[in-house]
Amino acid sequence: MSVVAVVGCAAGGLETLLDGLVRPLIEEGHIVPVVVTPAAYAWLVDIGHDATIAEVTGLPLRSAARLPREPSPHPAPDVLVGAPMSANSVAKLALGIGDNQALTLLCENLTVRPTVIFPRVNAAHARQPSWAGHLAALRSAGVDMVYGEDVWPLYEPREAPSGRGLPWNAVLARTRALLSA
């Protein structure tokens, strides 16, 4: 049984994190601690998924750092999955900026634990001059990127087809590959 730490950001599709990623990993026998950015936490609280994620995983949903005297509520990860990741969080991760608990977890483990990242971005994000460099930096650190027209075609802001789901199958496939390596 492996520990697959899931990190989520405030990006479209976050509301499907539980059924798209967390439950399938648990059904495969993995321990799945979930850590999200503060904005993502507010989104999950708003739809009532905070308590459900804690119940399903048996672990608290984290978004804030613990006090130094407190033990870590989550086990050490074997693999990390950042999905969905906002463009902002991907850029911060590439630059080593761990300014919240979710990014701190990724930054601390980036070069020592297998990591899958799904940037949930649009065409405008991808045109930003630094974007390609951020992706290159993460790939050079060994990050397995779920990115490209084959898994997530980019559309202009607010022009993507209605009801388009996140590529959870691709994220799960990459995660399984890292777990079996």
Image: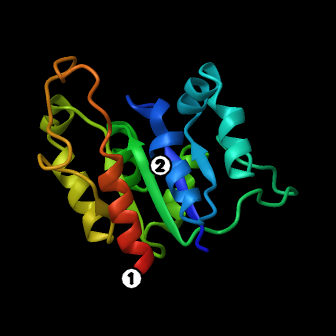
Q: Is mark 1 on a helix, strand or loop?
A: loop
- Asked which quadrant contains residue 49, the reply is top right
What residue does disc 1 label?
Answer: 181
Question: In the rendering, which numbered label is found on residue 13?
Answer: none
Farthest residue to the right: give it: 69
For the point 54% across and 44% down, the residue is: 99
Q: Earlier in the sequence, mark 2 or mark 1?
A: 2
> In this rendering, does residue 48 appear at all?
yes
Badge 1: few (under 14), some or many (20 or more) residues near its Cα, within 10 Å?
few
Q: For the residues marked 2 and 1, what is the alpha-carbon distance in whole angstroms?
A: 20 Å
Direction from residue 10 to residue 31 in the image, left or right: right
- In the image, is residue 95 above or below residue 143? above
- Asked which quadrant contains residue 145, the reply is bottom left
- In the image, is residue 164 above or below residue 66? above
Q: Out of 49 and 63, give the one closest to the viewer.
A: 49
Direction from residue 144 to residue 157 in the image, left or right: left
Badge 2: few (under 14), some or many (20 or more) residues near its Cα, within 10 Å?
some
> In this rendering, does residue 103 appear at all?
no
- In the image, is residue 125 above or below residue 173? above
- Coordinates of residue 54 in the picture (x, y in percent): 71, 43
Inspect the image, locate mark 2, and give the three-letter code of the amino acid beneath it. Answer: Leu
- Coordinates of residue 58 in the picture (x, y in percent): 74, 51
- Asked which quadrant contains residue 141, the reply is bottom left
